[in-house]
Image (spheres, grey):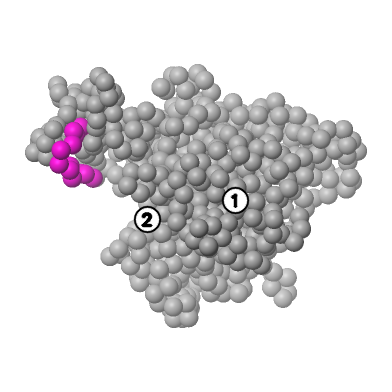
Amino acid sequence: MMKKPRSATTLAVTGNDTRNGRAVFRTPTGAWSQDVSEAEVAESKEAGENLLARAEADARQTIVVDPYLIEVAAEGDRLVPTRLRELIRVSGPTIVEIGDAAALSRAA
Amino acid sequence: MYRYDEFDRRFVEERVAEFSDQVARRLSGELSEDQFKPLRLMNGVYLQLHAYMLRIAIPYGTLSSRQLRKLAFIARTYDRGYGHFTTRQNMQLNWIALKDVPEILGHLADVEMHCLQTSGNCIRNVTADQFSGAAADEIADPRPYAEILRQWSSIHPEFTYLPRKFKLAVTGAPNDRAAIQVHDIGLELRRGEAGEIGFAVYVGGGQGRTPMVARKVRDFLPEAELLAYCTAILRVYNLYGRRDNKFKARIKILVHETGIEELKRDIEAEYEALRAENETLSVPAEEIARISAYFAPPAFESLPERSAAFETALLRDPDFARFVERNLVRHKQQGYAALTISLKPIGLPPGDASSSQMEAIADIAERWSFDEIRVSHEQNLVLPHVRLDDVPLVFAELQRNGLAESNAGLVTDIIACPGLDYCSLANARSIPIAQRISERFADPARQREIGDLKLKISGCINACGHHHVGHIGILGVERKGEEFYQITLGGTGDETCSIGEIVGKGFSSAEIVDAVETVIDTYLALRTGPDETFLQAFRRLGEAPFVEALYPAKAA
């Protein structure tokens, strides 16, 4: 599932948390966070490949599933994925969910 | 309804225990994702954009109140309080944690449900007409045969690793509401010359990236031969179906590449060989009778054809009259009706129901519909057996729960796949487009002026939203990072099945609702009268006037 990084882009690595499937991002400490702004970024293809290699090692440790690189951009002090698909993974569905309020807030 | 026997119960419990062990081994690191993925898919667990998704099988779309309440409980306890009903009459939960799956499967097993064969290259959940056992035009109830097929195909050792997934649908009526001609095998119940039951058999239909209408291979297959003949089809497919290219692996490609006549010869030869060596595949009449007994008509009362309570409500309440006009289906039993509960409220996601709504529907079904609910492939629910006297009471309860949208079969009764809001395969969003279209056409009078119209939206070429058979189909694609939407026209999944044609280049997200409106306005301007439906008008006119309206510069 690896996306080949293009040149001159800022990269982060993402995957799904093995336990609950949530979209997560590898941070500089090696932990995985649901907040993309906490992600470790790579500014070159080589740095991206290195970051991905560490994520794949985490996948072998059952921490995440199918890690891959994504492009991100800085917006103020936040990081934002550049592709819509990844934005939706970060922000959640772009629609109003109809679930009962209690369940929605509990599962959020 | 079918009830598990001891074998079914033990089988499902063993599968729950087996998968619980596999989940534990995955979470402990003993199984890698590559090892675990085929196991989880066999149990209906996908990994989507935001979480694991659990696809729960609802065989031939039939549920009891107890089962629907359990689905509501699971959605509220383990998910976000809602479920999504799909075009295969299943229900999906979008926010499942892997660690919870064994517990959920245990809850499902308690009410004789499971998630088996809702994924993978096997025979999937068998679908059927949502009005089975109720429809006035029905020749016979298709559910006993769907159940026989379900039992035969569950972990069938020969057909568990097919070249690709395999879908069956059965209709009991000549008016096809189960879209059988876009299935790998489609079965239409018929009566023979002596009144005996049999099937017209269609093979090789499907949607996805290569949409094809199925070809008829048998005009009349006696009911006892159902499993033997399906086995012959599956064997030919298993032997000759392509395994070198996943995009060419469905039986429709085999039909296309081999030619239907040669394939028919192959199937018939396999069938004869199979019959010669093993007669036991014939379904014994007593077994058909045993299964059919589970689907015996409920204890209908002997009622007059007309109901004073019903007719008074029709005169007094315009909202009720609108509901009846669109959501009530004539029943085979005098004094009863089947009711469609639209899961397409204006501006909200198609096919979703909250846990509270599921519980309300379960209560209504228990009280007024012999404890039965159906799921339609058009992502609505159905109360199959309601006394005409009770329809006003049911309508009032549906209104109280936000479930009385009177739009069955109208432009706002849209099929939409989960799209890029949930699905890891999608290229574009489907649900927001459906919401915007339903808001544009929200006016009930305008919807009725337009009349019968099936609008279907898919967020990628896999066509889970059935866009190929939409009178108006919309396919979401990604182009240079932007969502675009192609329009197809003239498709239908009914007995006159046809695949819609792409009319031209795609429209941006900002443009697509206007484009749909242009298509509809063109139809309204050109139809011979209100009795000529969109599909009839399209078939008479062809695509030219619609293309001219959509792409005026090109036409000039």
Q: Nearer the viewer, residue B93 or A10?
A: A10
Q: Which residues are magenta?
A: A1-13
The part of the image, by quadrant, that contains residue B191 is bottom right
Task: Report in which chain the residue with disc 2 lies.
Answer: B
Q: Secondary structure at mark 2?
A: loop
Relative to B282, is A35 above or below? Answer: above
Relative to B520, is B20 above or below? Answer: above
| Residue B273 visible in image | no
Q: Residue B421, image x and y in percent?
A: 42, 37
Mark 1: amino acid: Thr
Task: Report in which chain the residue with disc 1 lies.
Answer: B
Q: Is residue B341 left or right of residue B314?
A: left
Q: Main secondary structure of the magenta part?
A: loop
The part of the image, by quadrant, that contains residue B341 is top right
| Residue B363 visible in image | yes
Q: Residue B220, image x and y in percent?
A: 61, 73
For label 2, count other residues whose C-alpha is less than 10 Å away and answer few (under 14), some (14-19) or many (20+): some
Q: Which residue is mark 2?
A: B121
Q: Nearer the viewer, residue B127 or B536?
A: B536
Q: Nearer the viewer, residue B51 or B73?
A: B51
The magenta stretch spans residue B387? no
Q: Earlier in the sequence, mark 1 or mark 2?
A: 2
CA–CA distance in space, label 1 to label 2: 41 Å
Q: Nearer the viewer, residue B145 or B396?
A: B396
Q: What mark, if any, has residue B152 been given in the picture? A: none
Q: Secondary structure at mark 1?
A: helix
Q: Which residue: 64% across, 55% down?
A: B522
The magenta stretch spans residue A2? yes
Nearer the observer: mark 1 or 2; the answer is 1
The part of the image, by quadrant, that contains residue B3 is top right
Q: Which residue: 42% across, 63% down?
A: B210
Q: Which residue is mark 1?
A: B518
